[in-house]
Image (cartoon, rainbow, N blue to C red):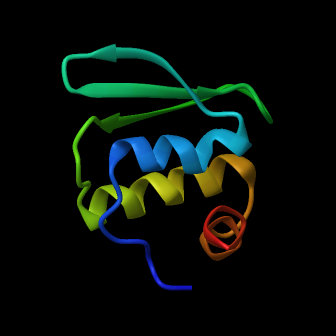
Amino acid sequence: MKRPRDLSAREIIRVLRPLGYRVTRQVGSHMRLTTEERGQHHITIPSHRQLTIGKINAMLWDVARHFGISREELMDRLFA
């Protein structure tokens, strides 16, 4: 599956909600998302209208590593 492009912070939050992620705090233009599934895990994303491809990719790798699945499998679950 191709990497998602042109995603906003709000879209990322919506996509990660089924995995248990929710906004736990915001400082300035950065939001911290936390999940309690399979242990506690945090990711920080900038609250921008459009996130860079590199930031999206790094975030997806981090989430996939936390859940013990490949990035491709994660993308299939989130964007299929």
Q: Vertical placement of 51 versus 35: above or below? A: below
Residue 69 location in percent, x, y?
Answer: 73, 63
- Which residue corresponds to the image point at 51% horizontal and 58% vertical from the top-left? 60
Residue 43 location in percent, x, y?
Answer: 46, 35
Asked if residue 60 lies left or right of residue 58, the reply is: right
- Which residue corresponds to the image point at 52% horizontal and 51% vertical from the top-left? 62
Q: Vertical placement of 78 versus 13: above or below? A: below
User: In which image quadrant can residue 80 be found?
Assistant: bottom right
Q: Report the number of discs.
A: 0
> From this viewpoint, which residue is outermost toward the bottom?
1
- Which residue corresponds to the image point at 50% horizontal and 40% vertical from the top-left? 13
Q: Vertical placement of 35 versus 65: above or below? A: above
- Which residue corresponds to the image point at 23% horizontal and 60% vertical from the top-left? 52
Asked if residue 55 lies left or right of residue 66, the reply is: left
Asked if residue 68 lies left or right of residue 35, the reply is: right
Residue 78 location in percent, x, y?
Answer: 64, 62
Residue 39 location in percent, x, y?
Answer: 75, 29
Asked if residue 39 lies left or right of residue 16, the reply is: right
Q: Vertical placement of 45 versus 77: above or below? A: above
Name the image quarter holding the N terminus.
Answer: bottom right
